Image: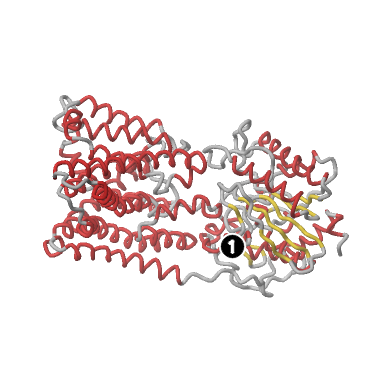
């Protein structure tokens, strides 16, 4: 399911649920292994973890190493840093945490998928392998604590079994409840979390812990196996990438997998065992781990190489190569290491197989440590930036582009490190500029598009002796209107709450003289107008902005909005890397990049002349085109956010525009 989904997502839109089936099966098998030892009164941690290390890590280390080498050859250099970070996270099995963190980091949430992104599920499994035997140990400890003197062996065994069953059920219930809550609150991050997925492995564990009489009865119900298989297959078609997943919807593939395992054995009358035990299915099952390891790097790197997704001809070729590599890895790596007597007969040698991960860890760490340091905040004479558009500099010297695309430090450059994540409802107030003896206070409020002006406004604030207060939130226009999540999953109630709290704080405690605000409208929609960037949605959001602005004006706080900046509709650093000898290939016409009508302009109309919109787009684009590099400075860090250096280069020219638009600012010269 997962392989087909990654090859042709439109054919099997819910194929990602194959991972959930995988979790259930793993939970069932691992719990069964642990139960057999536990029933004899022992839980051998070193032996258990050694088997896992011997079985899983050498093959994973091989795939990660080969993938990193191939990525360095095929990928554009702008993707190296992100790929290196995820190679490291995959080799150390915290990839799911890395992706969960990136999902709520607006500057990383739109990153291209790396060839090792699929390792997130393996990370969840490895974390399960660490936690699960400890649960058995805890159960043994609790049963020993509450055992009465003179209790017989049979009763002690039943007590231990009941203890581990209760703990497993409690964990499953708690994890499922948290998964439902977190998926509703922040689906992109919840998708990768260990706590939102643990119940799926635990569901398989509960089946493995069920009384033998019950499992024998279920095993004879062949119809149950077919029903489970039907539910699993149905989930692959009913679920889509926009489904609020995992949450309650994950019950569909999980319960289907539980039913398939319970009623799918050879004991089931008329069950699916003949299908699942067919030679082809057994072969695929045997190589399934290596198949999963290899399939996504091949698909991802092929897409980077060809610039398009696999088609009807290339897809089967990729699948055939994946099967071949999986068989070779299973035969010459998995089995050779797993069955080698020298290793298998010694638990510490088995555990030592985890050291094979040192190879990809070292390769990724060496690259990351060699990454250029974040921009130091200065612009030399060879980097006029926006001055080249204003005519202040007419002769731009030849120099390397500033700065090299560096996604690791991009967030700090563009917001001063003070950008609230998607799910935040409480503002983070940061203070910059002249904090000792300011002549007035300016607040920068809005989403990351407002934050992109931080470097420029901070330079102006220092020069003009303003205190600069920032209130910034990822993917959250400062509007009273409820907006939908940019990825189509749910609405941003946290954003709406955040905006109301910010307004209250501005009026009651911060009391700035001027509020500067803007937004990024291209991914915005509302419950009443769910099409992104539709005129109706932008007008509704603009009306919500005007409500906030009116409240500020009534409180004696003036508002100076900045018109939305250009959107070039493609990743600019990648385009620059691909067309380094002909940057004009990355130019975008002004008419396509800049919206004529937007939430800011709609809000300004509703204010009836009380606010003046600052149009700073002439500092970003020329009369006809928006270029990727201006005055030797990279303009955009992605498709629409200004880089820190370019933002700062606009300061001398943004300043007079602000003074002209705001009488309050101009009065404090």
Q: Out of 224 and 455, give the one closest to the viewer.
A: 224
Q: Is residue 443 above or below residue 279?
A: below
Location of the N terminus by quadrant is top left
All told, the count of numbered labels is 1
- Residue at the far bottom: name it: 381
Q: Out of 43 and 616, give the one closest to the viewer.
A: 43
Q: Is residue 401 above or below residue 534?
A: below
User: In terms of secondary structure, where does tag 1 sit?
Assistant: helix
Query: How far across and how far down the image is residue 296, in percent?
Result: 35, 50
Residue where numbered disc 1 is placed = 412
Residue 358 visible from this viewpoint: yes
Q: Is residue 31 left or right of residue 393?
A: left
Q: Is residue 533 above or below residue 406?
A: above
Query: How far across and how far down the image is residue 413, in percent?
Result: 61, 63
Q: Quadrant of residue 230?
A: top left
Query: How far across and how far down the image is residue 95, in percent?
Result: 40, 55
- Which residue does the image show at 74% across and 66% down from the upper left? 435
- Which residue does the image show at 75% across and 40% down from the upper left? 547
- Which residue does the image show at 21% across and 30% down from the upper left? 263
Q: Out of 365 and 532, give the one closest to the viewer.
A: 365
- Which residue does the image show at 24% across and 45% down from the upper left? 31
Q: Quadrant of residue 379?
A: bottom right
What is the crowding at mark 1: few (fewer than 14 residues within 10 Å), some, or many (at least 20)? some
């Amino acid at each position: 399911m997962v392989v087909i989904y990654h090859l042709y997502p439109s054919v099997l839109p819910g194929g990602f649920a194959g991972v959930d089936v995988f979790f259930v099966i793993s939970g069932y098998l691992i719990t069964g292994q642990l139960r057999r030892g536990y029933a004899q009164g022992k839980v051998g941690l070193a032996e258990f973890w050694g088997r896992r290390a011997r079985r899983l890590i050498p093959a994973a280390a091989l795939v990660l190493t080969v993938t990193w080498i191939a990525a360095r050859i095929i990928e554009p250099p702008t993707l190296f840093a992100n790929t290196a970070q995820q190679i490291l996270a995959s080799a150390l099995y915290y990839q799911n945490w890395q992706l969960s963190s990136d999902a709520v980091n607006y500057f990383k949430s739109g990153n291209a998928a790396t060839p090792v992104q699929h390792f997130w599920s393996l990370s969840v499994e490895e974390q399960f392998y660490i936690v699960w035997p400890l649960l058995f140990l805890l159960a043994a400890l609790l049963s020993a604590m509450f055992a009465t003197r003179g209790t017989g062996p049979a009763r002690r065994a039943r007590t231990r079994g009941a203890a581990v069953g209760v703990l497993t059920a409690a964990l499953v219930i708690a994890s499922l409840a948290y998964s439902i809550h977190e998926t509703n609150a922040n689906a992109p991050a919840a998708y990768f979390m260990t706590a939102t997925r643990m119940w799926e492995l635990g569901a398989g564990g509960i089946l493995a812990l069920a009384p033998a009489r019950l499992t024998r009865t279920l095993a004879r119900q062949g119809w149950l196996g077919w029903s489970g298989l039907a539910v699993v297959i149905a989930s692959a078609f009913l679920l889509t990438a926009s489904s609020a997943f995992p949450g309650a919807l994950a019950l569909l593939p999980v319960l289907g997998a539980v039913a398939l395992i319970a009623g799918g054995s050879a004991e089931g009358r008329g069950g699916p065992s003949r299908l699942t035990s067919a030679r082809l299915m057994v072969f695929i099952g045997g190589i399934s781990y290596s198949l999963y390891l290899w399939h996504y790097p091949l698909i991802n790197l092929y897409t980077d190489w060809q610039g398009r997704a696999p088609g009807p001809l290339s897809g089967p070729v990729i699948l055939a190569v994946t099967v071949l590599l999986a068989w070779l890895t299973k035969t010459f790596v998995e089995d050779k290491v797993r069955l080698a007597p020298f290793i298998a007969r010694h638990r510490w040698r088995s555990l030592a197989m985890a050291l094979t991960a040192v190879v990809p860890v070292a390769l990724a760490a060496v690259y990351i440590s060699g990454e250029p340091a974040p921009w130091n905040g200065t612009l030399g004479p060879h980097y006029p930036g926006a001055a080249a558009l204003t005519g202040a500099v007419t002769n731009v010297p030849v120099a390397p582009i500033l700065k090299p695309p560096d996604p690791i430090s991009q967030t700090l450059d563009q917001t001063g490190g003070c950008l609230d994540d998607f799910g935040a409802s409480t503002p983070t107030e940061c203070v910059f500029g002249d904090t000792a003896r300011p002549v007035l206070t300016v607040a920068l409020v809005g989403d990351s598009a407002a934050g992109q002006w931080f470097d420029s406004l901070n330079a102006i604030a220092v020069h003009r002796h303003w205190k600069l207060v920032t209130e910034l939130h990822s993917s959250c226009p400062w509007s009273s209107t409820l907006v939908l999540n940019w990825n189509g999953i749910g609405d941003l109630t946290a954003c709406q709450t955040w905006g109301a709290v910010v307004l209250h704080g501005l009026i009651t405690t911060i009391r700035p003289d001027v509020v500067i605000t803007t937004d990024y409208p291209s991914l915005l929609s509302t419950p009443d107008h769910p099409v992104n960037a539709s005129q109706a949605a932008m007008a509704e959001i603009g009306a919500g902005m005007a409500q906030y602005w009116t409240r500020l004006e009534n409180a004696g706080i003036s508002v100076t909005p900045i018109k939305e900046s250009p959107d070039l509709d493609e990743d600019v650093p990648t385009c620059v890397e691909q067309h380094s000898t002909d940057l004009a290939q990355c130019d975008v016409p002004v008419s396509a990049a800049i919206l004529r009508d937007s939430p800011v302009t709609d809000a300004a109309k509703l204010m009836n002349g009380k606010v003046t919109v600052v149009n700073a787009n002439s500092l970003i684009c020329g009369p006809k085109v928006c270029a990727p590099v201006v005055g030797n400075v990279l303009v955009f860090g992605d498709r629409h956010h200004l880089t820190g250096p370019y933002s700062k280069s606009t300061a001398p020219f943004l300043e007079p525009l602000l003074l002209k638009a705001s009488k309050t600012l101009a009065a404090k010269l």
